Image: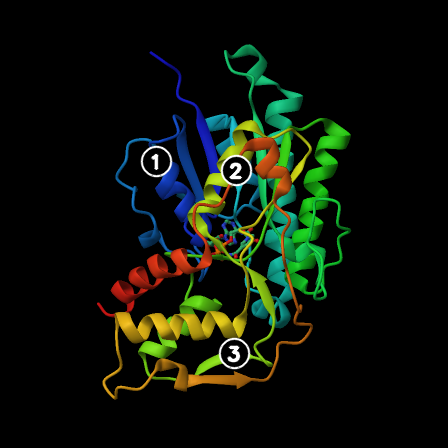
Amino acid sequence: KEETNYTLVTGGAGFIGSNYINYFCGKDSDHIVNLDKLTYAGNLDNIEVSERENYTFIQGDIGDKELLKELFEKYRFRRVVNFAAESHVDNSILNPAAFVETNIAGTFNLLQNAYSLWMEKPFHLKNEFNDVRFLHVSTDEVYGTLGKEGLFTEETPYAPNSPYSASKASSDFLVRSYFHTYGLPVLTTNCSNNYGPHQHDEKLIPTIIRTALNEDPIPIYGDGKNVRDWLYVTDHCKGIHLVLNEGRFGETYNIGGRNERENIYIAQKICELLDKMSPRNNGKSYSDLITFVVDRPGHDQRYAIDASKIENELGWKADENFESGIVKTIKWYLQKYQK
Ligand code: NAD
């Protein structure tokens, strides 16, 4: 009987992790073990493949030393994809401690366990496969903010401005150190803002759609001129999988859709599409509901990614631009919010 290979996916009940599992469970030959604490951000309804034989869910904390030891011994994971994180910048301003615990200490605990399984007791050298690998999913926010010009490359110095991005930057450095110090086969991806199905209600795009449909004011921070580089979540997941399988160990890869848009453009575009896809009863445009609110402290002005490395080295390219991805996204949220 062929041996089953296991991939540990952490945070798989959240937005990007669930899209990753929904897309790759079955397409990839490994059995996926999803370890998720189910914080307010995790929701098992996000998983569309939970009945599959090659999928297992375990509720738990990546910071739990005993649990991780037990799981690494039991499944002898050959790959780890680390999505688990506290991910909302506004929450990091109010409660930074949880960000330090999960994003930094939790990632450290994962690295330690991968190290002791793969490097101290290198089981994989005795097996037919020797392709163990650890992919850490991170953000472009570690690079800080850009002015009107320029793009983040893999060489851009880290300059995080929020407790969220500082905790992600710390975890990226820990991951890097496990390669340089111990030779752990790690990979890091730094991605721009994602959007698509299963994103938590608190984030910008679901908030715009939901408040519009509820006839509530659509809140936009400051003057709405902050720029983000938007990537459709499935494109991100495909990039992660490619780096996981074909990336060079110890390297980081920026993933971005070359879709820079101002927040106010995002709000107006969504309103324009909703006007067609779900018109208001009063005949007016949803854009009447757009309301500027006091800016977030330390709000980064602009993020934009140079994705040349993953494009040239691994042949990745985003399939969706913002205008095509947002139509799919709105269709999905219309079903969710109009149930
Ligand atoms: P999310 O908040 O939607 O999901 C995070 C998941 O992690 C949740 O299911 C939560 O229950 C789980 N989790 C939290 N703490 C945990 C712990 N201690 N142990 C186990 N599970 C825990 O986040 P997301 O938007 O899917 O982001 C996933 C990853 O991608 C994060 O590392 C984030 O930094 C990164 N990222 C996100 C974006 C984006 O636009 N959303 C962009 C770039 C990078």
Q: Earlier in the sequence, mark 1 or mark 2?
A: 1
Q: Amino acid at mark 2?
A: Trp
* Relative to 80, residue 122 above or below: above
Q: Earlier in the sequence, mark 3 or mark 2?
A: 3
Seen at 75% across and 50% down, the residue is: 156
Q: CA distance from mark 3 to mark 2?
A: 32 Å
Picture coordinates of residue 222, whole percent (x, y): 60, 81
Q: Which residue is mark 3?
A: 220
* Relative to 225, residue 65 above or below: above
Picture coordinates of residue 35, whole percent (x, y): 45, 43
Q: Which residue is mark 2?
A: 316
Specify the quadrant that holds the C terminus: bottom left
Picture coordinates of residue 18, whole percent (x, y): 40, 48
Q: CA distance from mark 3 to mark 1?
A: 39 Å
As helix, strand or loop, the secondary structure at mark 2 comes to: loop
Q: Quadrant of residue 225?
A: bottom right
Residue 258 visible in the picture = yes
Residue 36 visible in the picture = no
Q: Which residue is mark 1?
A: 55
Q: Residues within 10 Å of mark 1 (few under 14, many from 20)?
A: some
Locate residue 227 relative to residue 153 in the image: left or right: left
Q: CA distance from mark 1 to mark 2?
A: 26 Å
Seen at 61% across and 80% down, the residue is: 295
| Label 3 vs label 1, nearer the camera | 3
Callout 1 touching callout 2 (CB < 8 Å): no
As helix, strand or loop, the secondary structure at mark 3 comes to: strand
Q: Number of labelled discs?
A: 3
